[in-house]
Image (cartoon, grey):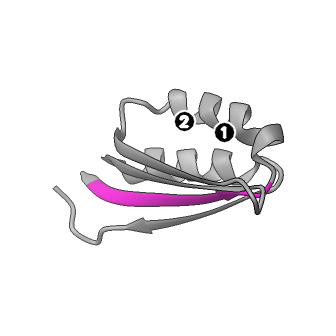
Amino acid sequence: MKRVAVISAILEEPQKNQNEFNRVVANYKHLIKGRMGLPLTEEEVTIICITVVGEINDINSLTGKLGKISNIQVKTSISKREF
């Protein structure tokens, strides 16, 4: 069963970790329905929100891999409703 989820990430040093972040996300492109990025140049931070639809294991796998990248904080909200 699939669920909808929103993955929010704060990249604290985007110049150092954004390429790795993008490589991980690209491996899960089949799940992604939308992505929004907000660079906060003065603060040297980037905020990225990704909307995904997929199996809970795939969503958790993506979240886990993103969370292992240094200087990135990741939180995920997953719908209770399955479809």
Instruction: Please give the name of the residue rendered at 28% of the width and 56% of the height, measured from the top-left corner.
Output: 3
Q: Label 1, on which residue?
A: 21
Q: Which image quadrant: the C terminus?
A: bottom left
Q: Is residue 78 above or below residue 58?
A: below
Question: Dot 1: within a 10 Å radius of its alpha carbon, few (fewer than 14), some, or many (20 or more) residues?
Answer: many
In the picture, measured across the screen, residue 42 lies left or right of residue 8, that is: right
Q: Main secondary structure of the magenta part?
A: strand
For numbered disc 1, what is the local secondary structure? helix
Q: Confirm or deny contact between disc 1 and disc 2 (CB under 8 A).
A: yes
Q: Which mark is residue 25?
A: 2
Instruction: Please give the name of the residue rendered at 21% of the width and 68% of the height, measured from the top-left corner.
Output: 81
Which residue is outermost to the front? 42
Q: Nearer the viewer, residue 27 or 80?
A: 27
Q: Is residue 10 magenta?
A: yes
Q: Looking at the picture, how far across and down is residue 17, in whole percent?
A: 77, 40
The image quadrant of residue 54 is top left
Instruction: Please give the name of the residue rendered at 79% of the width and 40% of the height, measured from the top-left corner.
Output: 15
In the picture, measured across the screen, residue 70 lies left or right of residue 76, that is: right
For numbered disc 2, what is the local secondary structure? helix
Q: Is residue 9 magenta?
A: yes
Whole-Å distance between the Cαs marked 1 and 2? 6 Å
Q: Is residue 76 above or below residue 61?
A: below
Total marks in image: 2
Q: Nearer the viewer, residue 35 or 42?
A: 42
Q: Which mark is residue 8?
A: none
Q: Looking at the picture, how far across and down is residue 63, in whole percent?
A: 57, 52
Say what amino acid the circle numbered 2 marks. Val
Q: Looking at the picture, how far across and down is residue 2, in whole percent?
A: 26, 51
Say what amino acid the circle numbered 1 marks. Phe
- Span shown in magenta: 3-12
Q: Looking at the picture, how far across and down is residue 66, in whole percent?
A: 65, 47
